[in-house]
Amino acid sequence: MFIGVALAFISACKDTTTTTYRNFVSPMIGLNVPSGNEFDVKVQFGTEQKVDSVVYLIDTIKVVSKTDTSAIKLRTAGLKLGNHLLTAKIFGEGKSEDLTSNINILAAQAPAEYTYKVIKTLPHDTASYVEGLEYHDGFFYESAGDYGHSSLRKVDPATGKILQKADLDKQYFGEGITVIGSKIIQLTYREKVGFVYDKATFKKLSEFSYTTGREGWGLAFDGQKVLNTDGSNTIFFLNKDTYQKTGSIDVFDNKGAIQNLNELEVIDGKIYANVYTTNNILIINPETGAVEGKVDLSGLLPADYFKTEDAKANNVLNGIAYDKATKRLFVAGKKWPHIFQIELVKK
């Protein structure tokens, strides 16, 4: 794959230092660089050996060769967000030596900020520890978690009544779900297994091994592939038939990686993701992983609704569902008394 590289010779002067060791002067290890920006590359070559040429690589891809030791600039165009290894391969006197540093490429700009307007408040079963939520054909499909209380549910939005339910065995902690045609896919938390159900009957059709992430968290389906989180800053892409990994993106805003990505929904081509233990939903570019928007949903529930500190810490915002036909957005939380239909309002 071609990576765009811009070179700018900063100085053609000879190095007058008398050091005998070699290292990167810049970039410093872990330098954060906004996507699309240039960064300086300068190596201290020392004086012990003659330098015939230097080859610079980003990850394993050669980006430029030089026959002098002057500093250069490299661009980040074409590189994925996240960590990248920079290598200077130095040749001289029949020998070679590798020097390494690394950079973190961040989103190019700060995310747009949103608040919300509540359009409708719907009833919700407070016994449900919401791990996954979807809206299809006039119903909510919900995955409730927690050992001994996990289930798959079909719910009437107007009344909150459970219309169908499949309980998981007590050794399983139910996690994210998504609907793919006539099937519902459900992950488990730490059990490394997923379940496939018939959407109409809730009959379990099969099981599959889940080994993609460190744990099973969120799921969504964009019409072609399954999206999956594991509590890190990575969104995995899974084959819709085999549920095996086909790719991934790492999620960054303009300040750094966003950890604890959880429940997912795909809305108008963008990925919406809950950030676990926060009141935030992120709007993510599915191609780059850049956070383009951040929705602050603070205040949906009264601050004193959950009385104990343990309940406050655990019964957090989680659950995003979208009605494509009417463009209605729904959000929920763990053991919350309501599911809220909301409208986003840009700050």
Image (cartoon, rainbow, N blue to C red):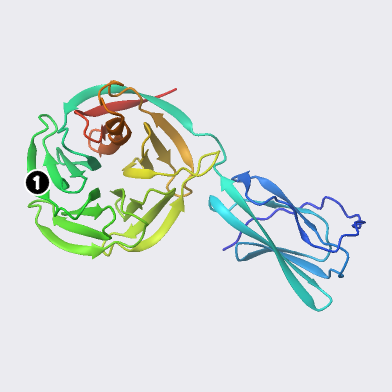
Q: Relative to residue 342, is residue 103 depicted above or below?
A: below
As rendered, which of 256 and 126 lies closer to the eye?
126
Q: Quadrant of residue 193?
A: bottom left
Amino acid type at image mark 1: Lys
- Give the quarter of the image for residue 341: top left
Q: Nearer the viewer, residue 102 or 7?
A: 102
Residue 316 drawn above or below residue 8: above
Q: Position of residue 168 (x, y in %)?
A: 14, 52
Q: Is residue 186 visible?
A: yes
In the figure, is residue 279 to the left or right of 250?
Answer: left
Residue at the image point whose x is 7% and y is 52% from the top: 201
Q: Position of residue 95 (x, y in %)?
A: 78, 76
* Above or below, comparing residue 275 to residue 84 in the picture: above
- Which residue is at 68% across, 47% downward? 38
Q: Which residue is depicted at the point 41% across and 37% down?
A: 282
Position of the C terminus, as image quadrant, is top left
The reply to whether residue 329 is in sight is no
Farthest residue toward the bottom? 94
The residue at which mark 1 appears reads as 165
- Find residue 243 and report its horizontal and vertical position in percent: 29, 61
Task: State left or right for residue 235 relative to residue 256.
Answer: left
- Residue at image position (21%, 34%) is 335
Q: Is residue 212 left or right of residue 180?
A: right
User: Callout 1: few (<14), some (14-19), or many (20+) C-alpha neighbours within 10 Å?
Assistant: some
Q: Which element carries disc 1, helix, strand or loop? A: strand
Residue 191 in the image: state x and y as whole percent: 26, 58
Count every numbered label the image shows and give the total. 1
Q: Quadrant of the N terminus?
A: bottom right
Residue 192, quarter of the rendered image: bottom left
